[in-house]
Amino acid sequence: MTIFNTTAKLAKSALLATALTVAAGGAAMATEGYGDCPLTGEKGSASITPAVPGQFTVIINLPAVGQFNGDTPETIKDGYEFCMAVNIAHRLGLDKVKLVNASFDSIVAGQNKDFDIALALISVTEPRKKVVDFSAPYLASAHGVAAKAGSTLTEETIKQAHVGTQAGTTLVSFAQDTLGISNVDVFDDTASMFTAAAAGKVDAVMTDLGIVLGQVANSGGKLQVVGKYLDDTQTAGIYQKGSPNAETINKIIEDLKADGTLKKLETAYLLESYGGVSPDDVPTWKP
């Protein structure tokens, strides 16, 4: 866990802040507690009773290249979901953002306590709604497929391949039930799953397309993106069941979408973390 108290300003952040000012009006540079994220909107325009007094507590699942850029909570300064959380905290008048790393499985099972929102590219599903509450959606979802560099895996051969997925994700049932893949390994975390793919211990791995693009771009040429499956589900944050703060935070997320803040963050952090590869350029496979 970490509390951010960084005041350093990077040139990139200044440029992004300028762009956000045009998009949302009245933007300010990041202040104490917000890493290197630019801010939009009015500080303290809304309020909640946070889970931990004086701070905005966010559950995350690392690694999350492009979303939370850093190997540990202590090193994260920017990223799409991080800067979205920072802007929510800013509009709530909370100067500190604390990140708490947790397993994806525990997040979607509603096992974590004392947090304000969980952000981990989480797909909205009916079974998950039974144990957690979802925020307003903020990204569309798609399934990505990565393999070791040089792989000849195709849309047809993946169904006979040895495939890795991550525990707690919708990709487990998608691989087994929708694609009919019989040889599926379920990994506890993102890092070990992609390490296995780079080492050739599995023929491919499947998870959210954004995570796949980020991990491939960060692999030093050891991995490649081979395909994607379109998905009609939405990506949203998670609240503890019955959170009294959901309505207020949802309104802020909707405002961040409407005033262009999230689109600017997407351009600044996601496309860069994908190594310049647009999700639209990845071949679409059919189940």
Image (cartoon, grey):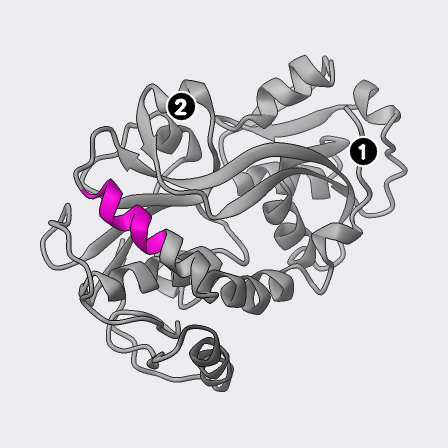
Label 2 belongs to which residue?
A: 128
Label 1 belongs to which residue?
A: 285
- Magenta stretch, residue numbers: 245-253
Can you see residue 100?
A: no
Report the amino acid beneath label 2: Arg
285 over 246 or under it: above or below: above
Can you see residue 108?
A: yes
Residues at marks 2 and 1, CA–CA distance in whole angstroms: 26 Å
Name which of mark 2 and mark 1 comes first in the sequence: 2
Residue 226 covered by magenta stretch? no
Residue 61 location, x and y as percent? 42, 44
278 over 232 or under it: above or below: below
Density class for disc 2 (Cα within 10 Å; few <14, some 14-19, many ≥20) is some
Residue 147 location, x and y as percent? 76, 40
Report the amino acid beneath label 1: Trp
**Could you tell me which residue is drawn at 81 percent across and 26 percent down?**
158
